[in-house]
Image (cartoon, rainbow, N blue to C red):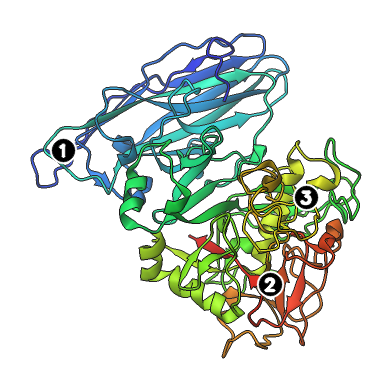
Amino acid sequence: MNNQKSKNKEVLSVALVLLLVMIIVGVTYAAFTFSKTGTVENVITTGAVTMIYTEGENKITINNAIPMTEEVGKTLSDENFIFDFTININIVGNTTISYEVTAEKDPSSTLANSEVRLYLQKSLDGTNYDEEVLQPSPYEPMEEDDEFGAKAGEMVLDVGSTNKTVMYYYRLRMWVDSSYELSDVAKTFTIRVNAYGKDGGYKEKSNPNPPELVGDMIPVVYNEGSGSWQKSSTSKGSWYDYDSQKWANAVTIKDSTKRTAYKNASVGTAIPIEDINTFLVWIPRYSYTLGNSLGYQIEGADIPSQPTPGAFDIKFIKKNITNLGSGKYSGDTAENYFTPSSFCWGDTCDEEATRSDTGNIELSGIWVSKFEMTGTIEDISSIPNTTSLMNQNIANFFTGIQTVMNGESGLTNYGFNGNYDTHMIKNTEWGAFTYLSQSKYGKYGNINYSGTNKEVAINNCSSYITGIGGDTVSASSSSTTCTTNTYEMEKGQAASTTGNIYGIYDTSGGAYEYIMGNSNNEISNAGFSSMPARKYYNLYIEKTGIKGDATNADGTQYFYRDRDVLVNYSIPWAIRGGQYNDSTDAGPFNFDRAYGYSGTGSTRFIIAAW
């Protein structure tokens, strides 16, 4: 966010109407008042005219609020509950601009930030408000160096044309969360809605789907100064910025008392590692093209080859969009994007012809355990600097995750709640973070790495400690790095899918990981009496992978010289990422096969939520 208040900014005031609604709920103090003031239309003129910031009176107030669920708040249709405003962009000259809408809290407000929900939608015609700019989120203060209060959403316009006018329409709803307990004390909450324009030099940013927290998952960021994880706001930029390889992280807390305390704690509260039982990373829904057979060359990168493959072209998409093209470039033009089935939850998602079957659910994204599984099969965790959980057959891993991390046990142990499924990782889900890592949003796009060092580095710890990075990308197995190259250190972060602390670890080296990918429904020695429901594994009938699974369907085999052995009848279960005699074989693009019995293999888990 541009914080130079004196340069290139002009307030856009927001719409002047006074409304009063009273809802009686059987108690004398529980009336609900919603009032709005502002001006009808907001205008930015840029190019020949310098923008100047001017404060406005664009206020929305709720008083003695009635608690509402998200479902009710999102669908309020009475005009008394809707705050509509417009932004009219006048381009003068040839320029690129951006603008953002913010919500600044009145200091006199007495409702807690966490009790208030903001929901902002956008329309191109002023009729169908069908684009979510901000999903229902608590009011959260911005970072200390951001001067305009809390963001209700950020919108970017990259025009670059002469004398052009564009009109955008917005609809804002504000309500009090259903968790709020009514009292006989009158409480109010007032925000001032502003839109600010910024002129020139703006690089368009991506717009990934906001992370969907499951139950009492807590958003976190890493404080390098204190060397600790701390509670984050849920706003884009503060919590995550995929353009800067800052993927959204969240944690779960086993102790229910501490979980409640952290849930209600203020932004910036430190959360010690010892209170955390799982770390998770959000992979937003996307479509990809691979650029011929090796990706495309981005600025500063090597010419694509198998040892140094190029970037994957990824665009983030909403969950109502599914692209089923080839997933490859045609010449130098990106087309035929493909949305991998990792973002579809159901029995027939892997086949393009059946993907739209009733019962399949398209997802906004998935949560991936940040580290290999740790703890025990009865007390599953995913934390750094800990020995990976091993010596289990595939059925034990699968059943343990199902039993411990779902339903009442999932609520008790992790605070999970709502529509979700925690399950053992599939090949396509492994591919989801591998492809993202091989894009400008992952380690491949991290300017701190070049050439072969853009590959995710190996965890070469001989005792299988999570979050370790080798001295080199393909370092041999060693005991000396197990305590020195930890996940928060520079060499440890080279083994992350982002090249920094916000990525996924242990995907190269460490223990090899059992994956729910199977050949021809062969149970083999995995411990199953029968195969689980089809949605829980990728089925391989022929000798070809599934698009998006980082095996051979997209031509990604041999990338970074990784191992490439697909499952078959005799050895039917997929494994990924582990250490081998030749350490250059390891890596996220590595794929191999195993019988499925217990050994020095681990796994990780995925959360699908809808």
Specify whether residue 102 is in view: yes
Residue at (36%, 52%) from the top-left corner?
259
Residue farthest to the front? 480
Q: CA distance from mark 2 to mark 3?
A: 22 Å
Contact (Cβ within 8 Å) of mark 3 with mark 1? no
In this view, the residue in front, 311 or 344, is 311
Left or right, residue 120 beside residue 162: left
CA neighbours of label 3 inside 10 A, class few (<14), some (14 to 19), many (20+):
many
Q: Nearer the viewer, residue 275 or 440?
A: 275
Q: Which residue is mark 1?
A: 31
In primary-sequence order, the first of circles 3 and 1 is 1
Q: For residue 212, say whether it is visible.
A: no
Residue labelled with disc 3: 312
Residue drawn at the location 52% of the way across and 71% of the way down: 359
Q: Earlier in the sequence, mark 1 or mark 2?
A: 1
Q: Which residue ends up furthest to the bottom in the rendered image?
A: 529
Q: Amino acid at mark 2?
A: Glu
Residue occupied by mark 2:
351
Is residue 287 toward the left or the right of residue 293 in the image? left
